[in-house]
Image (cartoon, helix red, strand yellow):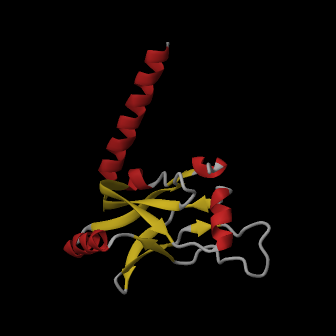
Amino acid sequence: MTHKSANINIRNKRAHFDYEVLETFIAGIQLLGTEIKSVRASKVSLAEAYCRFADGELYVINMNISEYDFGNINNHEARRDRKLLLRKRELTKLHKKLKEGGLTIVPLRMFLNDRGLAKVEIGLAKGKKIYDKRETLKLKDARRDMDRAMKQ
């Protein structure tokens, strides 16, 4: 069975600008029925989202999944905390790296896999300084200028 919605790919555009991503993981996400319907309609924002540990579990905080348009009284809350599903050894590895300090976990993108399941790509990241952000913008502009020159 193929899913026509398997091309859903929601990106966190600020993540690579604000953070230097050191390592990435693919995690499942625990969603309610109306949430997955909103995800299939691409009504998700990862812009202000981040991940945090609570009771040995990893949760994504502040991810906005808009309420489902055709939902009823049982519709979900848009910004609730959602549990991420990772293997135990991945969780312990992430927890150890966070304890070392200076690192954070940010969601980079959300997508549906070939079985139609919602997945979140998270990244272990280190915050960039202002001058690093300027350097990123310079590189981006230079790449854009080179692409323009190649097309002419």
Answer whether residue 128 is visible to the viewer in this image.
no
Residue 120 shown left or right of residue 6 in the figure: left
Q: Is residue 151 above or below residue 73?
A: above
Q: Is residue 23 left or right of residue 16?
A: left
Q: Residue at x 54, y 56 (%)?
A: 115
Q: Residue at x 63, y 50 (%)?
A: 3
Locate residue 119 relative to residue 122 in the image: left or right.
Answer: right
Residue 63 visible? yes
Q: Residue furthest top?
A: 152
Considering every residue shown, the one lying at the far front of the view is: 1
Report the label total. 0
Q: Position of residue 91 (x, y in %)?
A: 31, 73
Q: Position of residue 133 (x, y in %)?
A: 35, 49
Q: Residue at x 46, y 66 (%)?
A: 28
As displayed, is residue 62 above or below residue 109?
A: below
Residue placed farthest to the bottom in the image? 55
The residue lying toward the viewer, choosing from 110 and 136, is 110
Residue 33: quadrant of the picture: bottom right
- Tell me where residue 121 appears, x and y as whole percent: 43, 58
Left or right side of 142 for 62: right
- x and y, in percent, of residue 130 in the image: 33, 53
